[in-house]
Image: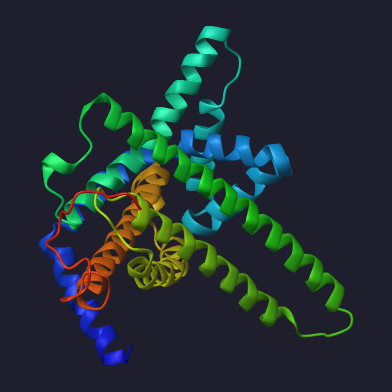
Amino acid sequence: MSPKHLFHLFVKAVQAWSDDYAPSMGAAIAYYTVFSIAPLLVIVIAVAGAVYGRDAVQGVIVAQLTGLIGPQAAVLVQDLVVAASDTRKGLVAGLVGVLVLVIGATTAFGELQAALDRIWHVPPAQRPQGAWAILRSRLMSLGLILGLVFLLMVSLTVSAAVAAFGALTARILPGTELMLQLLNLAVSLGISTLLFAMIYKLMPSTRIDWRDVWVGAITTAILFEAGKFLIGLYIGKSSMTQAFAAAGSLVVLLAWVYYAAQVFLLGAEFTKVYSYDHGSRARGSSLDHEPGEARQVR
């Protein structure tokens, strides 16, 4: 695909992003995500910690959060995780706590699904309705969380391997730091792309082909990685935390999640535009139809 075609698709995606009121949807996603982040991280740390050790996984997550949203907001998230994972309870309270954790962790994914259904113009009658449909939606969200855990474990393994390789070659081949940084960036982009592709493929209540999601997933991953650097630079240079006093850490967290939501929604719009212009829904293809086709067996 030529740069001209890519630019044309990007312009159409931005227009669709505006027409679908993505800024408002992003605000809703950010709101739900802030309340879901603690139970989500509790589940991630518990599952991945069973393999790598709880302290090791929690340390990596805190380090990543510090790089993304700054040390003060990262401490806020860490405190939320500690409060949500308090195990000093009885059996009944513990079971109820697990249920609340699962519901809380999957709430943000439910909001993501609602946003994706709106982007793909899925009619309300074809969206999940009733107790069983909602339960299936929650189970799928839980499955995506477990997929996130798996990708985190892959990332930890690769990072450890890269670090070991760097320590081994530092004495033999000086100056390999740049190569290792590029390798880490490539791994991070690959994992982010796979995660976004899974969400764009599995979450909407309409049929999406795998070949339609990769361009949007790669675009989203690149914008996400660029945003990690830019918003981290902004947070480090601005006085946002001081301006909002005690609520500064929460404001920083909301700002970052809101940006991430906008990137996610723009990537979803790009995926839809690509699908109708060059993918499975292009005119004359076997899936040429109006937006909102009911979900079919994949």
Nearer the observer, 91 or 166 = 91
Q: Please say which color scheme the image uses.
A: rainbow
Inspect this view and state whether residue 237 appears.
yes
Please name whichever residue, 258 or 134, is drawn nearer the observer in this view of the structure.
Answer: 134
In which image quadrant can residue 212 be found?
bottom left
Q: Is residue 26 above or below residue 9?
A: above
| Residue that protrudes farthest toward the right in the picture | 171
The mark total stands at 0
Location of residue 211 in the rendering, given as x and y in whole percent from the top left corner = 37, 69
Q: Is residue 186 above or below residue 192?
A: below
| Residue at left offset 48%, top offset 62% | 194
Residue 37 is situated, as x and y percent measured from the top left of the image, at 44, 40
Side of 99 relative to 259 (left or right): right
In the rendered image, is residue 54 in sight?
A: no
Q: Is residue 172 left or right of residue 280?
A: right
Q: Nearer the viewer, residue 45 or 212?
A: 212
Q: Residue at x 20, y 77 (%)?
A: 277
Q: Residue furthest front?
A: 286
List x then y, in percent, for residue 227: 41, 67
- Taking depth in this image into account, of 118 and 131 the one nearest to the observer is 131
Judged left or right of residue 175, residue 142 is left
Quarter of the rendering containing residue 198: bottom left
Q: Residue 114 location, x and y as percent? A: 23, 45
- At 52% across and 26% down in the image, what residue appears? 83
Residue appearing at x 43%, y 72% in the figure: 222
Q: Quadrant of the N terminus?
A: bottom left
